[in-house]
Amino acid sequence: MREGIPIASKMIADNPVVGASPATVRNVMCTLEHEGFIYSPHTSAGRIPTHKGLRCFIDGILNRTHVIENHLQQLTTSFSKSVTSEDMCQKASQLIADMTSMTGLVVMPKPHDMIIRQLELVRLADSRILCVLIDEHDHVQNRVVDIQRSVTDQTLHQTLLLLNTSLAGFNFDEGAERLTYALKQADPEVARLVKSALFGETVEFNEQIVFASGETRLLNSDISNDINTLRRLIRFLKMYRQ
């Protein structure tokens, strides 16, 4: 972890706290991956936590940690008034800053980094299709796509089947690789509709959003004596913050 590279199962097994063989460690990792707690970004990578895995880790910390009652009330009151994900992230960064007297930092993942759970295609008119994308957190993105000519119900059904087979359970980058292969074998009308639904002019991907509060507190902390680096970090946060 300190080196920022994947850790071998033997290294984990050699830790006296673990007390298991490398084979047992590998079996546990396979189980965690099968149950959706960790995943491999690509073939040669190590395993990293999924959103489900991070949620489980945080819940475990909260169950073992005594939480001050007024902090719980403060969290409940603040987040109950949040109407958007952006609003909730900004309030969370401010709460972290206030409760720790340090800098609060919250990052919202780019939509195409999230795992796609399901897609739906709804006919609005002969030349317009509503593409509905639902991610792993049940967030919904709706896109109205203008197509050049009408499509049959059979083509619409085949397109929806191909999209869900290729993309469901993957993020956009992973799904794009699967989709490239699938399109080579697809009917030309289906391939055309897939490209229109996913890559039409109306499709936009937002960049990663950073929510930061209390950045200048870094200069008054013992985190580092390198003031110039801290100032560059603060400028960076201000540049990319929401």
Image (spheres, rainbow, N blue to C red):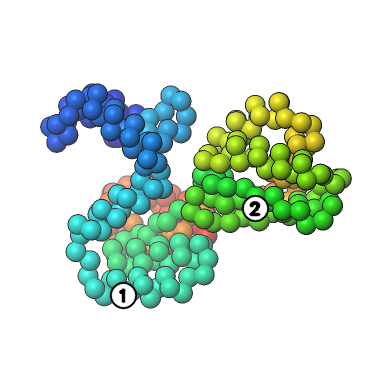
Determine the image quadrant of residue 218. bottom left
Q: Regarding mark 1 in the picture, which secondary structure is present there?
A: helix
Q: Earlier in the sequence, mark 2 or mark 1?
A: 1
Q: Is residue 227 visible?
A: no
The amino acid pointed to by label 2 is Val
From this viewpoint, is residue 164 visible?
yes
Tell me the element at label 2: strand
Q: Nearer the viewer, mark 2 or mark 1?
A: 2
In front here: 67 or 27?
Answer: 27
Q: Residue at x 75, y 34 (%)?
A: 191
Q: Nearest the camera: 231 or 8?
A: 8
Name the image quarter holding the N terminus.
top left
Farthest-out residue, right:
149
Q: Which is nearer the eye, 146 or 35?
A: 35
The residue beneath circle 1 is 73
Residue at 77 percent across and 40 percent down: it is 155
- Residue 132 numbered tag: 2
> Does 93 sit above or below residue 155?
below
The residue lying at 76 percent from left, 41 percent from top is 154
Q: Residues within 10 Å of mark 2 (few under 14, many from 20)?
A: some
Q: Amino acid at mark 1?
A: Gln
Q: Residues within 10 Å of mark 1 (few under 14, many from 20)?
A: few
Q: Is residue 241 left or right of residue 54?
A: right
